Amino acid sequence: MDITRKPTLNAYLRKATPDLVDYDTARNAWYDFRAARNYPTIKVPYLSVGDHNKKLALNRIPSVSFTGAPHRMAGLNACVNSTVSCREVCIRHTGRLDMPRAIQVGVDRTLFLKEHPDEAISLIHWETVREAAKVPELARRLNVVTDVNWEDVAPWLFTEAPENVVTYDYTKDWTRNPIAAERYRLTFSAMERHGAAEIIQMTNKGRNVAVVFPAEYKTTPYPEQWFGIPLINGDVTDFRYEDPQTGVIVGLY
């Protein structure tokens, strides 16, 4: 497939129509991909477990996540609705995620997704299945630093997921359904171009909106409301799946 003419990762993956392949095929493709890039350790999972991410480690239940590469860091645009400001403060460039090896791993995960979509998305599924078998409940976040419309790209990721798995994400695509697929809930991220009126319109539709507050709120309480809209503290946990689906503001410092 000629990827040079595809403007976004979403468009590319939708056209690829990824299929579910068996675990061994998917895993071996990932190992071969890492070997070709001279990683010292070849046999590692494609997904990250919650304790690899400080925020996800706060979740009420064990969590897995896909942490790729944002915007055009790996070629095709993986965050088509991003802005200059959000790219400057992207969590890809904070803490351990900003270390050179971590950045390279994120890029390679996204390149593997682009070059081997069947195997990459199948690995997301099978590794979810394996982790879900170990625990009563499992959370999954598919876009830690990307904004892929997974419900369009691979709807079987949700229909084939174990019953004890729930999935959540933040998104800057305000056209998506807040309940994007079976057991998949979205929180909509406000950007600098969104005014209070636009955010209020979203919450009036019952859609939760994440709003970034100054860093001082790391140590001081958030207000109970924002422009009359109930506000919850989004810093306590990353697990947005259990937020009230009533159109609230999710405060983040």
Image (cartoon, rainbow, N blue to C red):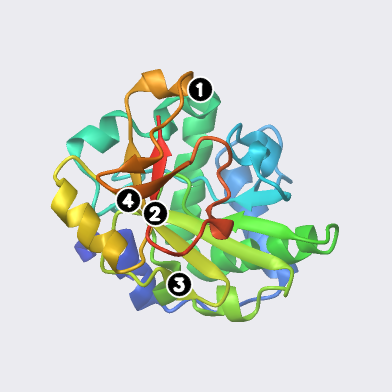
Residue 153: x and y in percent read 42, 73
Q: Earlier in the sequence, mark 1 or mark 2?
A: 1
Return the disc, 1 or 4, that comes first in the chain's sequence: 1
Image: 136 above or below 220: below
Q: Nearer the viewer, mark 1 or mark 2?
A: 2
CB within 8 Å, label 2 to label 4: yes
Q: CA distance from mark 3 to mark 4?
A: 21 Å
The disc placed on residue 229 is 4
Q: Distance between the Cα atoms at labels 2 and 3?
A: 15 Å
Front of the two marks 1 and 4: 4
The residue labelled by disc 3 is 179
Measured as percent of width and height from the top left, residue 242 is found at 58, 58
Residue to which mark 1 is pinned: 95
Q: Is residue 50 above or below residue 114?
A: above
Q: Are marks 3 and 1 in contact (CB under 8 Å)?
A: no
Residue 7 occupies quadrant: bottom left
Q: Residue at 65% across / 35% down in the picture?
A: 52
Residue type, numbered disc 4: Ile
Three-letter residue code for mark 3: Ile
The reply to whether callout 1 and callout 2 are in contact (CB within 8 Å) is: no
Q: Residue at x 65, y 38 (%)?
A: 58
**Of callouts 3 and 4, the N-terminal one:** 3
Mark 1 residue type: Gly
Mark 3 vs 1, N-terminal side: 1
Residue 67 placement, left or right of 80: right
